[in-house]
Every structure is written in structure tokens, then in C-alpha cells.
Image (tube, grey):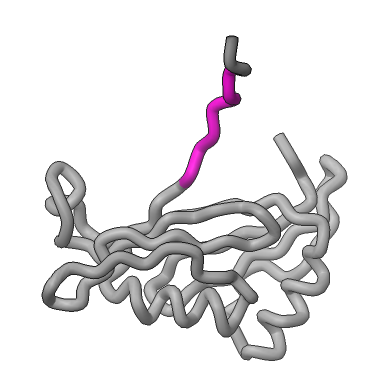
Amino acid sequence: MSEERKAAFYPEVLLVDAGAGMDWLERTLGFERKEEHRDDDGNVVHAEMRLDGAVVMLASAGVGREPFASMPAGVAVTYCAIDRVEEVHKRAQEAEADIALELTETDYGSTDFTVRDPEGNLWAFGTYRP
């Protein structure tokens, strides 16, 4: 009998230019590219990026199969629980990223900060693990 795997959520962020978004995540926050699939026109139809074991999926809006292709790029908030928040915050500062919420200690015991990507999406990092 095989062991049942726990459910896992993998947010997907639709971007106007997913390729540029991937470059920004890599350069500014230290994400690593794990998967990248493009269509014949060079649009990103599926990508996976990883930071400290956490995975986020990215795609260019308006491409791929339905019902996803008809979804517009939009502003998203993605939260990533990591232990090295201060290190990632420093990297974002050094890259002159748009830090929307500076490094702070919350009343529920988390160390957090939030950065805005060039398309307006918020990427929040903290030590809080629900």
C-alpha cells in the first residue's frame, strides 16, 4: 500500500511578460528556474521557480490552454514562508527593488517584508508558517 501524499498548493502568477518576471525574481530575490516551457511565439506557457524549496508557477497571460488563456494578467499577492527573511530582504534592497513593506516584526511572531515586482504583484516573505 502506498503512502498518501499531502495536498500542496502552488500559486501561479500570470504576467504580461513572464520571461521578464522570471529574470526579475532570479536577479532581485534569488529564485532559481526549474521549468520553462514556451510556445512557438516565445511566450511562457508554464514556468516553475523555486526559493528555499518553495515553488511558484508563472505564465504569460493570454497564452496556453483554456480556461487559463482567457485570464488577464492581474495583481497577485504571493506569500513565501522562509527562514532567511533578512538575507532575502537585504538582496532586494541591494537590487533597489520597490519594497512595499519594510522588514518588520509582527504581533503574531513573524519577521516579514513585502516587495513589489515591475508589474505590481506583491511578493511577501516571512517566518510565519500557517
Q: Which residues are magenta?
A: 4-10
Q: Main secondary structure of the magenta part?
A: loop
Depth check: 33 or 123 in front?
Answer: 33
Residue at position x 37%, y 67% from top?
36
Q: Is residue 9 above or below residue 100?
A: above
Residue 74 visible (yes or no): no
Q: Is residue 33 above or below residue 108?
A: below
* Percent coordinates x, y for residue 113 in the rendering: 70, 64
Image-based side of 46 in relation to 57, left or right: left
Q: Is residue 91 above or below residue 10?
A: below
Depth check: 85 or 51 in front?
Answer: 51
Residue at position x 37%, y 81% from top?
20
Residue 129 visible (yes or no): yes
* Percent coordinates x, y for residue 126 in the rendering: 74, 55
Residue at position x 51%, y 38% from top?
9
Residue at position x 62%, y 59% from top?
124
Q: Is residue 98 highlighted in magenta?
A: no
